[in-house]
Image (spheres, rainbow, N blue to C red):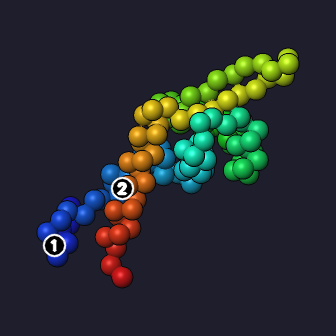
Amino acid sequence: MKENKDGEKIRSLSEIDRVIHEPARLLIMAYLFVVESADFLFLERQTGLTRGNLSSHLSKLEDAGYVEIKKEFVDKIPRTLLSLTVSGREAFKAYRDNMKHVLDELPG
């Protein structure tokens, strides 16, 4: 790691969570961070992702333990609810803080 003129260590980009850093997953995490939960169709509309693409990214976030996926029926209509887990919220906060730090340390 490099040191800046004040002697503080600059965080390396290698510390950035790559699961979250992918643009579509970052968008999903950002939307879910500001709500308690959201349904799949809402997230599909907000992100502009196709069903397949959204589903694939949600699976990766679920595998990482960041997103909880609940499937239920409402009046015989299937509904998928999505929410960040506690570790997902913590990971997103850490990602945000790490990115702020990296960007703040850039010259200019």
Q: Quadrant of the C terminus?
A: bottom left
Along the viewing direction, whichever of 87 and 60 lies nearer the viewer: 87
- Picture quarter containing residue 42? top right
Secondary element under disc 1, as helix, strand or loop, is loop
Residue 80 % position (x, y) = 71, 28
Whether residue 84 is situated above or below residue 22 in the rendered picture:
above
Depicted 12 relative to depicted 32: above or below? below
Q: Quadrant of the N terminus?
A: bottom left
The answer to whether 59 appears left or right of 13 in the picture is right
In the rendering, which numbered label is found on residue 67?
A: none
Residue 27 percent coordinates (x, y): 59, 51
Mark 2 vs 1: CB contact within 8 A = no
Q: Which amino acid does label 1 sit on?
A: Asp
Asked whether, in this view, residue 1 is left or right of residue 55, the answer is: left
Q: Mark 2 points at which residue?
A: 98
Report the Cα–Cα distance between label 2 and label 1.
19 Å
- Residue at label 1? 6
Identify the residue at horizontal 31%, vertical 70% (top origin): 105
x and y percentages locating residue 98 in the rendered image: 36, 55
N-term mark: 2 or 1: 1
At label 2, the amino acid type is: Asn
The answer to whether 24 appears left or right of 12 in the picture is: right
Can residue 64 be seen in this snapshot? no
> Residue 79's image quarter?
top right
Is 51 situated above or below 71? below
Nearer the observer, 3 or 88: 88
Q: Which residue shows up at 28% across the image and 59% down it?
A: 11
Disc 2, SS: helix
The percent position of residue 34, horizontal first and vertical second, equals 57, 46
- Whether residue 62 is visible to the viewer of this picture, yes or no, is yes
Who's the residue at 59% across and 36% down the image? 36
